[in-house]
Image (cartoon, rainbow, N blue to C red):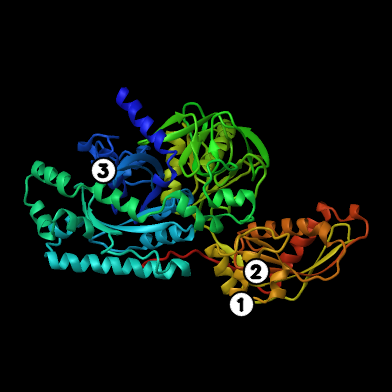
Amino acid sequence: MAQEEKKLTKIQRLTSSQKNIRNIATSAHIHHGKTAFTDNLLAAAGMMAAKNAGSLEEGMTTWQHADEQERLMTVDAANVSMAHEFGGEEYLINLIDTPGHVDFSGNVTRAMRAIDGTVVLVCASEGIMPQTETVLKQALRERVKPILFINKVDRLIKELKMTPEQMQERFIKIYKDFNKLVERLAEPEFKEKWQVDINEGSVAFGSARDNWALSLPFMKKKGVSFKNIFELYNMGEEERKEWTWKNAALFEVILDMVIKHLPSPVEAQKYRISKIWSGEAESEFGKNLTNCDANGELAFVITRIVIDPRSGKEISAGRLFSGTLEPGMEVYLNNEAKKQKIQQVLVYNGIKPEQVERVPAGNVLAISGIVAEVGETITLSPQTPFEEIKHIFEPVITKAIEPKKMADLPKLVEVLRKVLKEDPSLKVEINEETGENLVSGMGELHLEIIENRIVTEKGLEIKTSSPIVVYRETVVKKSAPAEGKSPNKHNSFFMTVEPLEDNVYNAIKRGDVHERRYKKRDDNMVKKLLEAGLSNDEIKTYKDIYKGCVLADETRGEVHMIEVIDLIMDSFEQVIDAGPLAREPCMKLKVTIADIKLHEDAIHRGPAQVYPAVRDAIADAMKSVNASLFEPLYGCGY
């Protein structure tokens, strides 16, 4: 018990030393060794038995669900924290172990908001794989700096029987391929700066399973060569473990590399905040965020929600960008525009959350007592919220779910709401009147895992339909203005539709242009759209960017437009969510308000009149140019 208290005291103490904090994640293609890698780091920090690290029977600490252990794969991201000594100082490492399967890549996207650096693992035998590109893209989109660990080197020796020279060639090829990806995917200012370098030590190689790693600077320091690694696999198991621990311990090489080459929150927030928060940088709140100010206004972003199966209480994990969190604080939820009170503040001692009295800015932690959604920005007073956490992939497979006993329908509705909270990359449509509940996921495995958890963990027997593929609606040419009349015939809306320009669409998808309603000039949006080839006059017409589609207003001098523009945007978003062909979402669409005719009296142009008129106008415009259906495609290779 005393040892447990000592560990917690150390981690709690280190949360206050912002320059000695590293918030990182593991990211990789499936089965490239992330969880065994995390196990070894935890074992070295004294958080689990060293003999169990990487063991499928006793280890894999971050697999918290039975289905992960059965399938031998990570499904949910898991937070762990540990201390490490480097250069005579103690450092706090907050690590998130993320899934590698494409169906669960939403976990990776959400984890990237909370961290500043990532260790990308690549199998020495398989090399760069499709999901390696995806996780790197997710990291760079959030301005998270990568370093490279080439894992499973034992396979080159035991399976492929490579010589030391061939191994070196393989490492150089992987490292060059990795840098090509960084150059292709990173923003201009980071293309060169964030490339990894073997000589500087931002590349390491080893075997997480056998608990060893090496980097070029470490080899020079310890006098170790490739020849020693070959000899390692001629030793007995105990002798190998002893040599490894003394000369090439994985935790020492990797955590030294993390501390030396990945930024502290103080450094990272100087360049990350402008990417993930669109508020006024020169405001007091903006300066608090940029400086990671523990004494500034509170700013906590939820990146993951876990619902305790016993108490039903929500635990919200995330990143504290500014201020200090304490139990009992009354806080403001900016997306939901309401106040709530924090009950507990928790830090991770290994994988176990432990209650503490206060945690300052720069930490990854969890809170309880708050009922919110992933992506919520928690402050003390109303502020500009952080940008929405955008997933690279969208749900492509849908199933209908119903309870085996109709009496369980209310319970199913409640369970689906909890499932959606824990996994926001799902899409759930609940119709409480008909009992039809549609769940859309990233693939069949994603939905299979969800179904299994509803039965085994939530205790509800269900029936499911066969899966169907999700489609998207769009147009391939510009329409003439189509008129939509309000039910009372006193208002008319003339709308055109056309394909959105590729450059604009790509800028939105990359996150360069933020998806939201634009009530006033936004310098970042203007800059990025000018780069995409639009003119100033065109940019001024943009009113709403929603799910990769744009609403533009080309009307002039309409005095009542200010009173109905929000209703028009509501209607536009409704059509984007459910198009006119098959009620499937729309994509890559530009809708323009060409003209409007409104009744003078406000009572005759309320929501009941505007909504159907605008929806009809957009739908008729799309049908007039033969609206098209797009089907999803799998991307293979990089």
**In this orientation, which residue lies closer to the viewer: 492 or 248?**
248
Q: Residue at x 77, y 61 (%)?
A: 614
Which residue is identified by label 2?
526
Quick check: 608 left or right of 377?
right
Residue 482, by quadrant, is bottom right
Point out the tag, 2 or 3, that comes first from the N-terminus.
3
Residue 588 point in image, percent of width and height? 60, 68
Q: Secondary structure at mark 2?
A: helix
> Which residue occupies the extreme right position in the image?
601
Q: Residue at x 86, y 66 (%)?
A: 558
Q: Secondary structure at mark 1?
A: loop
**In this orientation, which residue lies closer to the viewer: 475 or 291?**
291
In space, the residues marked 3 and 1 are separated at their CA atoms by 50 Å
Q: Nearer the viewer, mark 1 or mark 2?
A: 2
Quick check: 534 left or right of 290?
right
Which residue is identified by label 3?
40
Above or below, 600 against 62 in this view is below
Q: Secondary structure at mark 3?
A: helix
Disc sitting over residue 533 in the figure:
1
Q: Amino acid at mark 1?
A: Gly
Q: Residue at x 83, y 57 (%)?
A: 563
Quick check: 108 left or right of 165?
right
> Which residue occupies the extreme front position in the image?
88
**In this orientation, which residue lies closer to the viewer: 484 or 112?**
112
Quarter of the image containing the C terminus? bottom left
